[in-house]
Image (cartoon, rainbow, N blue to C red):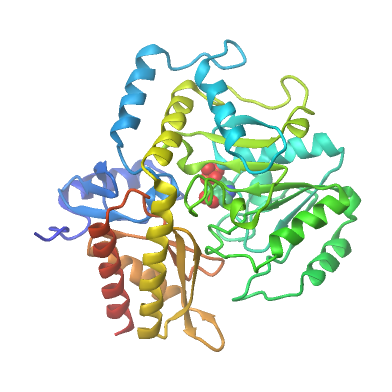
Amino acid sequence: MKAVKTALPGPRSKEWIAKKERYVPRAFAALAPFIVAKGEGAVVWDLDGNRFLDFTGGWGCLAVGYSHPRVVAAVKEQAERFLHTDFTAMMYEPFIALAERLSALAPGPTPKKAAFFNSGAEAVENAVKIARFYTKRKAVVVFEGAFHGRTLLAMTMTHKAKPYKAGFGPLAPEVYRIPFVNEYRCDLPFAEVERKLVSLVAPEDVAALVVEPIQGEGGFVVPKEGFLQFLRELTERYGIVLVADEIQAGLGRTGHSFACEHFGLEPDLICLGKSLAAGLPLTAVVGKAAIMDSVPEGGIGGTFAGNPLACRVALEVLEIIEEEGLLQRAEELGQQILDRFRKMQQRFDLIGDVRGLGAMVAMELVKDRATKEPAAAETSAIIREAIQNGLVLAKAGLYGNVIRMLLPLVTPEEQLEEGLNILESAIASVVR
Ligand SMILES: Cc1ncc(COP(=O)(O)O)c(C=O)c1O
């Protein structure tokens, strides 16, 4: 039976979308033209009974999929016990147990501690606050192509001006941007990056260098071999706190608990979010204990930071990842997607690059393989076409010309195959 049975939006979704346009601000524009009724694994159904594969995984939050029975049970159990105290008023077990678990899981031999927040942007801002307090320095170094969120400091650290920064200034001071070396668009010698850094800011004034080990919103940009190790050496030389923003890449998506493990890297601080609590708002900064403990009592935190429900679910998520072998599954999914994307690249000149790490795989679309002129309109058209045929896909990239896979790691074989077939047909129909 056809997965999408009505024109989109269907009649019931249409009623709600009309209300949404009346009451919800324009900024909350949605990718998919329907209203969700229910989700299970990698599948969602809309109010009109249409079925879609969700390869955006709720923008990378659903490593364990929609409505995992163990997550649902954990939510019920915790809700029946208590939903809130504020940890700084009265402490509770899930917060401490999760800090213990993440500290043990984080890469490297140095003892770690973990702090919790509500959004990725908040985790990034707090990592910078901790680094500033620890180093007694002010400057922050970030990368071209970076995405770190939408609050004042995080949007300043984010690269793409529209829609994230334009019109929202003045931006935060003391943020400096350097190139992210990668093979497809920015193959610079590492020494050139250091030269750029020291010409922008005195390294002795830099508190933190914040890097996504593989860039997410920037288009799943994989760093050139040796680049992250070079950044580790550089930050050690100048006493800069190295912050890995693994909000998108962490927690299994690349086939390791932390993307940094691919590079044998022990960052000073790591930001986590997205899949941590299966879609409940929970993020973390996990870092070297001496750095984390430099901040005095009350210096970081927040009313809902590390709320009991989200921490309880996060503990469940970490167990599910381990017990269901989702790190291994991420590798397998990633390999199959890479193979299939490479075949598609042979078929369509539109696909300029195929790249990824674990299940974090993307294709970059270009009008011309020699000039690499971004094919943004074609990318949007492919995504629209795929949705009409039952597959929701995420776009990415500084130029909006990357299709990235953020599918749940629990996606079964037949749904992976089904999704990739829909994508290939969508590309064929747009190329035509
Ligand atoms: C690498 C990275 N950092 C930070 C953020 C911001 O997270 P949030 O939207 O939860 O504030 C994101 C969100 O996509 C991200 O991918």
Residue in the image at 77% along x and 69% along y = 190
Asked if residue 389 lies left or right of residue 109, the reply is: left
What is the quadrant of residue 351 in the picture?
A: bottom left
Q: Is residue 28 visible?
A: no
- Would you place residue 54 above or below residue 379 in this image? above
Of all residues, the one furthest to the top in this rendering is 90
The residue nearer to you, when weighing 117 against 312, is: 312
Asked if residue 195 lies left or right of residue 362, the reply is: right
Quarter of the image for the N terminus: give it. Answer: bottom left
- Residue 114 picture location, percent across and down: 63, 31
Residue in the image at 30% along x and 37% along y = 67
- Residue 407 picture location, percent across and down: 37, 54
- Would you place residue 126 above or below residue 45 in this image? above
Residue in the image at 42% along x and 61% along y = 334
The residue nearer to you, when weighing 8 against 236, is: 236
Q: Is residue 416 visible?
A: yes
Asked if residue 197 lies left or right of residue 273, the reply is: right
